[in-house]
Image: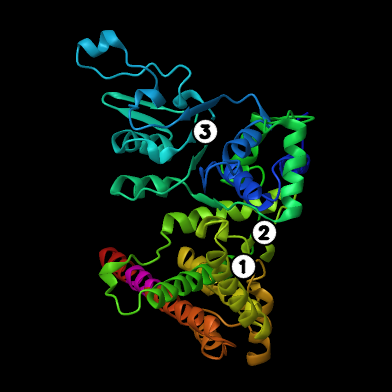
Amino acid sequence: MGMSIEEIAMKLKNAAAFIGQRVINREEVIEQAFCALLTGEHVLLQSRTGVGKTLLAEQIFGMFSGAKIFRVQASKEQQPDTYFGGLNIEELKSGIIRHNTTGSLVESEFGFIDEIFDANDFTLRALLSLLNERRLIRGVQNEPSELHTVIAATNYLRVSEVTEALLDRFMYKALILPDKEPFNQYRIAQKYMQHGGRTIEPPAKIPFTELKMMHGIITGYDAGYSINIKPEDLYFTNLVIRHFEFLRNRALRESHKGQSTAQYTDFYISPRTQAKSLDLLRALAVLRARTNVTHEDISKLYFIFATVGVPEDIALYKKAFQTVQNSLVSSNGFEQIAALLAFETLLQHIRDDRSLLDQPLGEFSQNPMRRTFVDWFKETFGGADKTIAQNRRALEQFIQEFVPSCDEVRELKVSVEQSMTRVFQQVEREREREEERRNRTQQTAS
């Protein structure tokens, strides 16, 4: 029998703690890297020379067994075959570009690319599909890759159209600053005297198959196990992200005061990155051996929206989180959001099955709105069962009498009202079409 989810989660937690004992004062970067492993994303480590980027990457990959590791030091002279394998000479004579991928990054589960921005733009462009789609696409060659996670290191950022696209492939970014605190320097010196700056063998390694299994659960490929996030917390997450984006752009405008917007680029979180944040939430829950996402997990989404190691970025995210959370907690907003989202779910059920409106409202027992809505209905109408038109009026009245406790709830109420209008318009059109069909059938019969 295989190991349980909780047992694997504990192994991952212990592995991160083991690395933290070897690579001093880098706990947050290590946790971020393990989230990248669990979500199947890539990590970019930036620092000045001699800070231990290579040691950190090697120690992380060294915690797993059964995975091939590709290592390379990037340089401007390199061509794509450095990463994809040498060209097949016989096919090249016929004008066909085909790489022999044996031992290359294509057939490796892990990759470490040191000084990645030393590579030329031609080579970096060739890497884009491999990093994003996990496919080698070169000429007529189009084949899947085993690649799971790449950790890249750099001493500097080089800005160009190609490098911007490359940076987008690295969902997790960290800036590792030199640690000059005397006690931490003492601990680092102790470790260096013991191991000479080398990686150390862990007491036990985690089979890569177990990491892949956890990755499947987190990204939704394993339907037999789920990590839950409540609808109101999912909505809360999106509110925090939006507020963080607003704060970042306000800070940008203030730092470029007097300049035109053409002189700087607005901070933007793409829908793709926002969707990936849900995988991160599940990864954070798994690392704590939980099957549900909590606010603690949501508070750490700066792992992908900011650069770990940049205090200003992290402080802005934490401010966005705290501001929205305080607003909702102090106003009973979470409960109101839960009620409105459940009401929206009921509307979607009605859209998919119009016959629900023919039922007495008291029979909506399986809907999560039941207690909130049905209790209100009984208080308002004395518990009498209504149908069809009365049901519709009751639903509309419920929303009309719903008093939002804060701006976030007020905005959601407007969206739900608009959704309700669309659903009822659709129901009315379907009713009219059914009436027309019945009339035609009766005319034909007569």
> Looking at the rendering, in which quadrant would you find the N terminus?
top right
| 75 versus 251 height, above or below | above
| Mark 2 vs 3, N-terminal side | 3
Residue 334 on the magenta span:
no
| 358 versus 118 height, above or below | below
Magenta region, mostly helix, strand or loop? helix
Instruction: Look at the image and give the residue range highlighted in magenta.
Output: 426-435
- Disc 3 marks a residue whose amino acid type is Phe
Q: Are marks 2 and 3 in contact (CB under 8 Å)?
A: no
For the point 73% across and 54% down, the residue is 182
Where is residue 7 drawn, in percent x and y?
78, 40
Task: Identify which residue, 245 or 252, lies in the foreground.
Answer: 252
Quote the CA–CA distance across marks 1 and 2.
8 Å
Q: Are marks 1 and 2 in contact (CB under 8 Å)?
A: yes
Q: Is residue 159 left or right of residue 109?
A: left
Front label number (3 vs 1): 3
Q: Is residue 358 left or right of residue 259?
A: right
Identify the disc placed on residue 129: none
For the point 32% across and 12% down, the residue is 88
Where is residue 237 drawn, in percent x and y?
56, 66
Quote the CA–CA distance across marks 3 and 1.
36 Å
Identify the disc placed on residue 233: 1
Residue 431 on the magenta span:
yes
Task: Identify which residue, 385 or 10, lies in the foreground.
Answer: 10
| Mark 1 vs 2, N-terminal side | 1
Quote the CA–CA distance across marks 2 and 3.
31 Å
According to the picture, the residue beneath numbered tag 2 turns out to be 293
For mark 1, does the 10 Å Cα neighbourhood hold few (<14), some (14 to 19), or many (20 or more) residues?
some
Where is residue 429 drawn, in percent x and y?
34, 72
